[in-house]
Amino acid sequence: MAKEKILVVDDEEHILELIRYNLENSNYQVLIANNGIDAIKIANKEKPTLILLDLMIPGKDGFDVCKEIRNNKETKNISIIMLTAKGEELDKILGLELGADDYITKPFSIRELLARIKAVLRRSGKVSDNDEESFITDTFSINFKSREVKVLDNNIDLTLKEFELLEILVKNKGKILTRETLLDKIWGYEYIGETRTVDVHIRYLRKKIETDDKNPKYIETIRGVGYRFNPNI
């Protein structure tokens, strides 16, 4: 079985070596870059499965790298975990809004990092428990195998996490899913106290699939609980 390929982007040499050593010991193939410009070049050429992306790097910062990766159809589905010394909530939320799959604040333990990587890879490579290949209404359609979403015959470009959220909601149509359930199912581990992550992704998903995201037709908010896909669609 081929090794999963991970690109580590950090301008601190000792961090790069520490992460590379532990990832290689965990049977991952490791690529490294110490600036944003090289990170994008390597991502475009090597198509890694996942990128560990530091926020404060020279050339282009982590936000710009994340944005460029997500805006390129050849790399948009690469999983991204942001690594940063910053702990401010706004930085974290911005990273998630730009399409990061997870966010770890330095200093972190190697055990935690490896667990996060496994969780993200598990979710990005998950096999659906549902045999449905598509979901179609008069205005909205999803092809679960090709990950193609259309609204009024227009292709909608979703990030990996946005698609996974939409998929689980649609496949549980009419069922209320709590924020905690969505965190566990989509992120693959206990994301204690971070229900804001779900709200951020739902907000951006609505902007992409709803005609009026302020009055959503598809994804309903169940106040104080979570979300559900409209059972009447």
Image: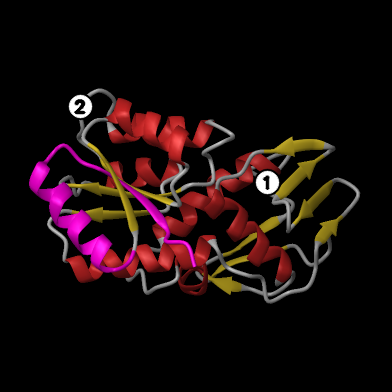
Marks 2 & 1, CB-CB < 8 Å contact:
no
In the image, residue 219 sits, relative to residue 212, either above or below, namely below
Which amino acid is tagged 1?
Asn
Q: Residue at x 36, y 29 (%)?
A: 64
Q: Is residue 193 visible?
A: no
- Counting labels gives 2
| Helix, strand or loop at mark 1 | loop
Residue 18 in percent (x, y) is at 14, 56
Magenta stretch holds residue 79:
no
Which amino acid is tagged 2?
Pro
Which image quarter holds the C terminus? bottom right
Q: Residues within 10 Å of mark 1 (few under 14, many from 20)?
A: few
Q: Which residue is mark 1?
A: 215
Q: Which residues are magenta?
A: 1-27
Q: Is residue 80 left or right of residue 142?
A: left
Q: Residue at x 42, y 61 (%)?
A: 3
Q: Which residue is mark 2?
A: 58
